[in-house]
Image (cartoon, rainbow, N blue to C red):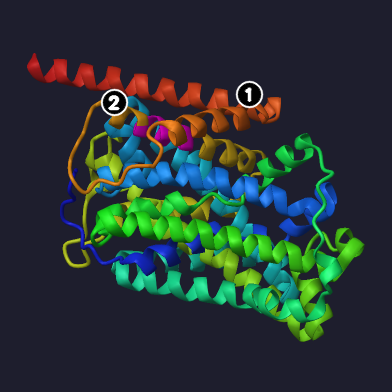
Amino acid sequence: MIENEGLKREIGTWGLVANSVNIIIGAGIFFLPVLVAERLGSGSIWAYVICGLLMLMIMLCFVEAGTRITITGGAYSYIENAFGRYCGFLTTTIFIFGAAVMANAAVANGLADTLSYFIPVFKKLWVRISFFAIMFGGLGYFNVRGLSKAMAIVKFNTVAKLVPILMIVVCGWFFIKASDLAVTTGNSMKDIGETSLILLFAFVGAETALNVSGEIKRPEKTIPKGIIISVLLVVVLYILVQVIVQAILGESITQHRDAPLAEAAKVMFGPTGALIVIIGATFSMFGNISGMVLNMPRILYASARDKVLPSKSLAKIHPVFRTPYIAVIIYSALGFIFASIGEFKQLAMLSSASYLLIYLGVVLSVIKFRLTGNKEPGLYKVPGAYLIPVVSVLVIIWVLSNLPANELKAMSVFILAVTAIYLVMILFNRKAKAGRKA
């Protein structure tokens, strides 16, 4: 088991659960019920069950890798340790630029759009840019000051976003009849499969919480419990939200594409209920961004620590606060810049494919670690020998094969470009070494 250096281990099981749930539940849950209902009708629950099982298998692989490699870096550290520097470099660039920053930019603009519902001045570009500067600057500041302060923000946002969702889940049963809960089985596997692919992207994020593995207390016990609890909580919550919202709105659900949960709350509690849900959606989006600013700089830090990225400054730890402060500042600045430029719809598509590629790398790393014969005591092992990792690989490949041709093409171009940058770095380093020897 690889140990950590320099960073404080302050995150317990429920801190990891809060961090993970905060990242998974972003803006998607507030409009997902419509997308699923219009394709599957009352058979929607099957897509959630299938998607939940697939994500649980993948996360079990993350758990095994996370208990073997407990240093900060999450998926990057697992893949880099299993397959070397090139794969580590690919993971870092795909994770940061293909998944995280672009997703943050889209969510930040979605947050500004939501605020403009109450405050129309947010539609003005200069106001939005100022808002992004304050938000990313503030989050960067708190993350530099210390992990405990950053985790306090994460826990607050997790509670704030869950309150309106739990309000619907708990109180919704008083507004529906038993006949509303009938589940049909007439959907084709094609419909269920394609809808599950959409939902799969709504479940991503639990693995991002492992980027702070070097700051998790007793990782060999905390990581398995925290991640498994997180995924199960989200699966159950998503299913309950879908069933209740669909039962309350009935066939009219497709008429409320932008805010089905708010409309269901309006039916239940009037305009006040809708307002609470909209405020909850605001906290949800902000919480998603705050979680990413907490976790993603650890990827930059870890890759610089391992000299996969050329910048030594990214690996610096603050002498007082013991946080990777340069990486936090750089990531926050990137978030601000890309959020200010636009929504990056095409890059948001790349974000989804990027997560799948990272999942594939982690699952393959678990298989590689198994084959190396590491027998250290206390390591978590996915049950069923190689069954779950192999099935996970097949599932991920199947999902990627169903991506639109333009997205596959864009991802291929991105990987080729990153590979070219890596080769240039190698040539530059070799010339530098030769120059020093001369």
Q: Which residues are magenta?
A: 357-366
Q: On the image, numbered disc 2 is attached to which residue? A: 371
Q: Was residue 85 drawn as part of the magenta stretch in this picture?
A: no
Amino acid type for the residue under numbered disc 2: Leu
| SS class, disc 2 | helix
* Residue at figure coordinates x 56%, y 23% from the top left: 413
Q: Report the residue that reaches farthest toward the left.
A: 437
Q: Which quadrant would the C terminus be assigned to in this image?
A: top left
Closer to the eye: label 1 or 2: 2
* Residue at figure coordinates x 32%, y 38% from the top left: 78
Of residues 413 and 256, the one drawn nearer to the viewer in this rendering: 256
Q: Which quadrant would the N terminus be assigned to in this image?
A: top left
Q: Could you say where residue 145 lies in the image, as x and y percent from the top left?
A: 29, 69
- Which of disc 2 and disc 1 is earlier in sequence? 2
Q: Could you say where residue 58 lies in the image, as x and y percent from the top left?
A: 48, 42
Label 2 neighbour load within 10 Å: few <14, some 14-19, many 20+: few
Q: Could you say where residue 206 lies in the image, as x and y percent from the top left?
A: 47, 53
Q: Was residue 358 drawn as part of the magenta stretch in this picture?
A: yes
Of residues 231 and 174, the one drawn nearer to the viewer in this rendering: 174
